[in-house]
Image (spheres, helix red, strand yellow):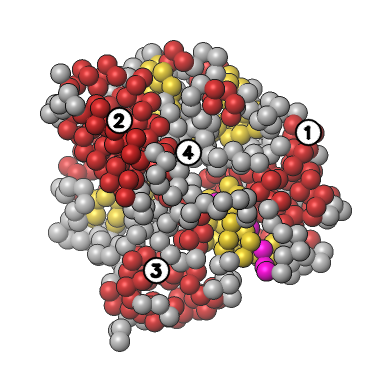
Amino acid sequence: MIAKVVSKNFDIPNAHTLEIARANGRYASLEKLFCLSPDETICEIERSGLRGKGGGGALTGEKWRLIPPQSSKPVYLVVNADEGEPGTFKDRQILEFDPHLLIEGIICASYAINAHHAYVYIRGEYVFWMNRLQQAIDEAYAAGLLGNSVFGRDFSLHVTIHKGAGAYICGEKTALLESLEGKRGHPRLKPKGKEPEWFFGNPTVVNNVETIASVPFIIREGYASYRAYGTEQSPGTMLFGISGHVKKPGVYELPYGTSMKRVIYELCGGIKGDKNLKAIIPGGSSVQILRADEIDDITLDYECLKAHGSALGTGGMIVLNESVSIPEAMKNLFAFYHHESCGQCTPCREGTGWVDRILAKILAGKGSKEDYQTILDAVDTMNGKTICVFAPSVAFIAQSYLKKFREEFEALIK
Amino acid sequence: MSRFGFNWENEEKFDALLERYPDKQSLMLPALWMVQYQEGWISLDAIRFIAKKLERTPMEVYSVASFYTMFQLQPVGKYHIQLCRTLSCMLCGSKNIQEYLQYKLGIKVGETTPDRQFTLSLVECLGSCGTAPCMRLNDTYIENLTPEKIDEILDGLCHDR
């Protein structure tokens, strides 16, 4: 079940140091990379079908293609390490155990889009991981793997770590760029057509840490080796983080298409306390919840989860056993969303707080019959009426909790 | 005029960072961090200082500083305990940990001990869901929390109690 594409060096002691990293295959893709043209590099990624691992699952090659090949303006690569989606703790494994893999990926991606400066935006809390990466960056500079002549070639690349400051919304790529520009993390309006992101008006690609860390394997082994994992539409592997009520929580690298049930009951040792499973939130907290009776045929890929009315998201699965009160879990998450709404759009800023307060009232035993419908109405007002996808996601999750566990809410309201 | 100023180390750091961004404005978050590490918190005086350095208005700097949870616009204790309250930590018992911390420190969430040694905050998902419950003690993650572990760590700290 376990795959070793990104996580290959995770168990090797001191693989975060350049010496051990190189002895275990890091930077081996560069020889091949510099034999390819930037266009051929993008082609390789397109053929691999690599999809973004930060939650959206967009095609990485398609994103890179949006950068004008002969841009007169400087091009930037921004790596999104603002890992904050509840239930998600995978990027930190890469930063901790194999930071050179990320740097190698940054070199490949920057070469493909002709960027000469890359920023890694890391959430402010991850101080240990920031230091880990900075150490690796310093080593890479000293070894000539970064700087004015990368790997002895006529290609310059600088990498700068940018420290976030505790705003969940900055994981949204346009909010991240606003933050990188020194502003409040307010998402930007989506453009009408397809275009790159913009950093101070310069064309920019924003990719998740794990996405970038998947690139060296594809360059080194070829796109077909990557496609050997996973399914036709979701090729490759992903780092799945499993938390909550399982006996062996943790991060496991799995090919897309792996059975969810096998992951929970075989890899993770089953449900903690030998209780029954009640529900699973499959892709970070911002996706619809699944009842225990819905997971039998679920495989971990974008298509299957979508067909089951949820989403693969970040691959961070939160497992809830039968002891959990669903209204209480929902209240916990709504306190989160209320705190983290950036405040830019009224339906989101007010709606999250409103639902949070109603849930508090219901849990305190003061709920009234109308409350159930009021929450549905409130989230309906949030859906599709805001700048970013935060509010629609919150609306969908609220509907799924309310509809799939209606009896639990009604039991509290009577 | 602000009385606040960077120490020489931060002055050097600031100048080095200027080279690494296409626009000075990107130094907003780095500068706020430098202030916070230098002073422990970010005063209005320091905000005026940053505004001058970045050629923005103090209000603009303040609006950014107040947006981000990790920037402290009030002084906090020498040790800032930030306990994760979000779902995976809750499922693994963060509420008990919260009660234990409140009992042990004699303060409630959001408060600082009268001797200014400890501040207790609840924070949102720290990304330690697989090793829950989790808290940060200043910049250090402490995971798989139990009351015994908290005793061990807090009792070993150097403080003036």
Query: Mark 4 falls on what kind of element?
Result: loop
Q: Is residue A86 left or right of residue A354?
A: right
Task: Decide: few, some or many residues near mark 4? Use Cα within 10 Å; few <14, some 14-19, many ≥20.
Answer: many
Residue kind at label 4, given as amino acid type: Thr
CA separation, marks 4 and 1? 27 Å
For residue B69, which numbered disc appears in the image? none
**Region of the chain picked out in magenta, as a range:** A73-80
Q: Quadrant of the C terminus of chain A?
A: top left
Q: Is the residue A60 above or below the residue A322 in the image?
A: below
Find residue A34 and report its image quarter: bottom right
- How far separated are the C-alphas under marks 4 and 2? 27 Å
x 49%, y 66%: residue: A181
Q: Is residue A356 left or right of residue A401?
A: left
Q: Report the disc number at residue A88.
A: 4
Q: Mark 3: which amino acid?
A: Leu
**x, y percentage for residue A51?**
64, 39
Q: What kind of residue is marked 1?
A: Ser
